[in-house]
Amino acid sequence: MGVFRKILFWSYGRTSWQYDVLAVLILAFVFLTPPAWFSTGKPNGPAAHQSDVLRTTRKLFIRPDNLPANPGTHDIERQAQTEAGRSDVKVKRVQTLRGEGGQVAAYEVDIE
């Protein structure tokens, strides 16, 4: 029982051979254990109740040529729907990208 207690509470001195053996055993376990031992067998995707909440977000770059002079979010969303080929596209964020001279070069749009 005394040896088990010493191993459990790691009470061997740092310069002892028992300490070295325990350290080697721990390292062997960490590096040699097959990953399948820790696998639950379940897919890593979102749970079924989260699938409606989690949606993929994509970036879309829209050129200002196809938009009015001062486009609003509605105009940009309509153009994003046209370019994505889907009517259910929702715009989450719009960032204006400017080129040299301060002109609008494109709109970076996050859509879902």
Image: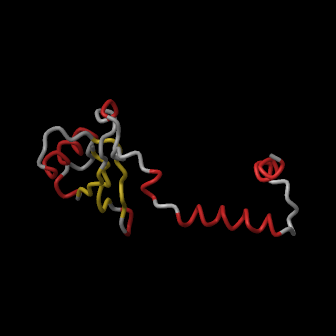
Q: Is residue 43 left or right of residue 8?
A: left
Quick check: 63 above or below 86?
below
Name the residue nearer the viewer: 15 or 56: 15
Q: Residue at x 33, y 41 (%)?
A: 92
Percent position (x, y) of residue 6? Answer: 82, 51
Name the residue nearer the viewer: 69 or 15: 15
Quick check: 47 above or below 36?
above
**Total residue callouts:** 0
**Residue that protrudes farthest toward the top in the picture:** 49
Q: Residue at x 30, y 62 (%)?
A: 105
Percent position (x, y) of residue 13? Answer: 88, 62
Q: How is colour applied across the structure in the image?
A: secondary structure
Quick check: 44 above or below 105?
above
Percent position (x, y) of residue 29? Answer: 59, 61
Name the residue nearer the viewer: 18 or 27: 18
Q: Is residue 69 left or right of residue 24?
A: left
Image quarter hosting the C terminus? top left
Q: Residue at x 24, y 50 (%)?
A: 69
Percent position (x, y) of residue 19? Answer: 79, 64
Q: Is residue 100 left or right of residue 52?
A: right
Q: Residue at x 25, y 39 (%)?
A: 90
